Image (cartoon, helix red, strand yellow):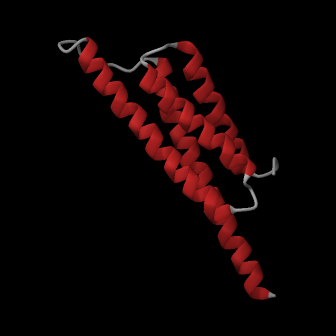
């Protein structure tokens, strides 16, 4: 389980999500959305025997990260409607986590193709 590169990618995504949760508090909705994304990534690590379910959960996690950014934009427009939107370092971390989750999904799918090819040879 831990020797797979997608596990490392997902673990880094969880760490970045937790760091983002602990740095700045925007709203409860955004907190819950990011907590959900980090929880999905953590769950995905532990279902390593079900690769297709892992790939599906990675995709769900990506959509949750996108929802977090939509909520961030809505929240920033509600709090300061005339201010320009800018990203700080703690708001970029979920984007990096989403990229890591996408990389993990790609590696999971590659593993599944490798396993299916090995099963075909038998």
Residue at x 58%, y 42% (from the top left corner): 100
Count of marks, rendered view: 0
**For this view, does 73 lie left or right of residue 121?**
left
The quarter of the picture where residue 121 lies is bottom right
Q: In the image, is residue 2 above or below residue 35? A: below
Residue found at x 42% / y 32%? 68
The image quadrant that residue 110 belongs to is bottom right
The C terminus - image quarter: bottom right
Q: x%, y% of residue 11?
A: 69, 38
Question: Which residue is found at the position 55% from the left and 36% from the top?
Answer: 36
Task: Judge left or right: residue 67 versus residue 31.
Answer: left
Whole-percent x, y for residue 75 in the image: 32, 21
Residue drawn 81% across and 47% down? 2
Q: Residue farthest to the left?
A: 82
Above or below 93: residue 120: below
Instruction: Estimate the x, y position of residue 106 in percent, counting from the top left.
Output: 58, 57
Q: Is residue 12 at least partly visible in the picture?
A: yes
Q: x%, y% of residue 7?
A: 72, 47
Q: State whether residue 108 is above or below residue 66.
A: below
For residue 85, say whether it is visible. no
Relative placement, left or right, of 12 versus 78 is right
């Amino acid at each position: 389980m831990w020797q797979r590169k997608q596990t490392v990618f997902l673990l880094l995504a969880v760490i970045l999500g937790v760091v983002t949760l602990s740095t700045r508090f925007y709203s409860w909705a955004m907190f819950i959305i990011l907590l959900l994304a980090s929880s999905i990534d953590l769950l995905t690590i532990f279902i390593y025997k079900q690769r297709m379910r892992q790939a599906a959960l990675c995709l769900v996690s990506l959509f949750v990260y996108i929802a977090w950014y939509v909520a961030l934009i809505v929240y920033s427009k509600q709090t300061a409607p005339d201010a320009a939107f800018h990203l700080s370092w703690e708001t970029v971390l979920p984007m990096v986590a989403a990229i890591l989750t996408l990389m993990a999904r790609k590696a999971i799918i590659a593993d599944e193709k490798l396993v299916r090819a090995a099963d075909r040879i038998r």
